Amino acid sequence: MKNYIDTINKLLGENRTTNDQNSDAMLHYSKMSVKRLERWLEKGELLPETIETIKSITSPQHWIVLTEGWCGDAAHSIGFLWMMSELNENIQFEWKLRDENLELMDQYLTNGGRSIPKLIVRDQNQNDLFNWGPRPAHIQELRTELMAQNLPYEQVNVEMQKAYNKDKGKTIQKEIIALLEKTDISLLAQ
């Protein structure tokens, strides 16, 4: 995860973002996202059931996260994904920038859009086990409700930020664990 943060910070030092949309707003979002990600990496906690399930994985998995440095949802999610992956040597974690990997991204659209972050979990033969993203279901529902009210974009972002802070990464963990358990393959040796 350090190389991801270093990449974003290096670009910010050059007044750039990960996708070269270098507006003041995008630079601001990138700075905020790095701070939020670093905060979760420092203070985020994995649930006991998350630790137990992740440690029980006995077959190799490749976790690919499509993201961008300015993405607010990614700031609240990818740190937890990385912390989970660090619990088990069978999990290879890799991040890729969405806009540099559109061919891959376009295989995992959300309602026709390139929404991020997107976690793609594959087995040792690169077969898809599942994918997740761009955000926990209850935060997606909140976003949908807020957007239906035609609220300003910034107000929607503030409300989503509050929801992420209240949740403290618990829901993303529960959703990933449910997907792992649903595959059955996560607990079986290959």
Image: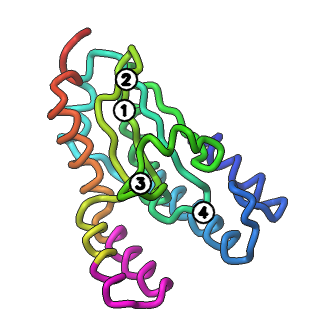
Residue 49's tag is none
Measured from the top left, where is residue 72 in percent x and y?
50, 65
- In this figure, which residue is indicated by the disc labeled 1? 121
Residue type, numbered disc 4: Trp
Q: Residue 146 colored magenta?
A: yes
Instruction: Please name the predominant secondary structure of the magenta segment in the image.
Output: helix
Question: Is 107 positioned to the left or the right of 186 in the image?
Answer: right
Residue 29 drawn above or below residue 4: below
Sooner in the amino-acid sequence: mark 4 or mark 3: 4
Q: Are marks 2 and 1 in contact (CB under 8 Å)?
A: yes
- Residue depth check, mark 4 versus mark 3: number of the one nearer the observer: 4
The part of the image, by quadrant, that contains residue 14 is: bottom right
- Residue depth check, mark 1 versus mark 3: number of the one nearer the observer: 1
Sooner in the amino-acid sequence: mark 4 or mark 2: 2
Sooner in the amino-acid sequence: mark 1 or mark 3: 3
Residue 70's tag is 4
Question: Is 122 positioned to the left or the right of 16 in the image?
Answer: left
Q: Residue at x 36, y 32 (%)?
A: 121
- In this figure, which residue is indicated by the disc labeled 3? 77
Residue type, numbered disc 2: Gln
Residue type, numbered disc 3: Ser
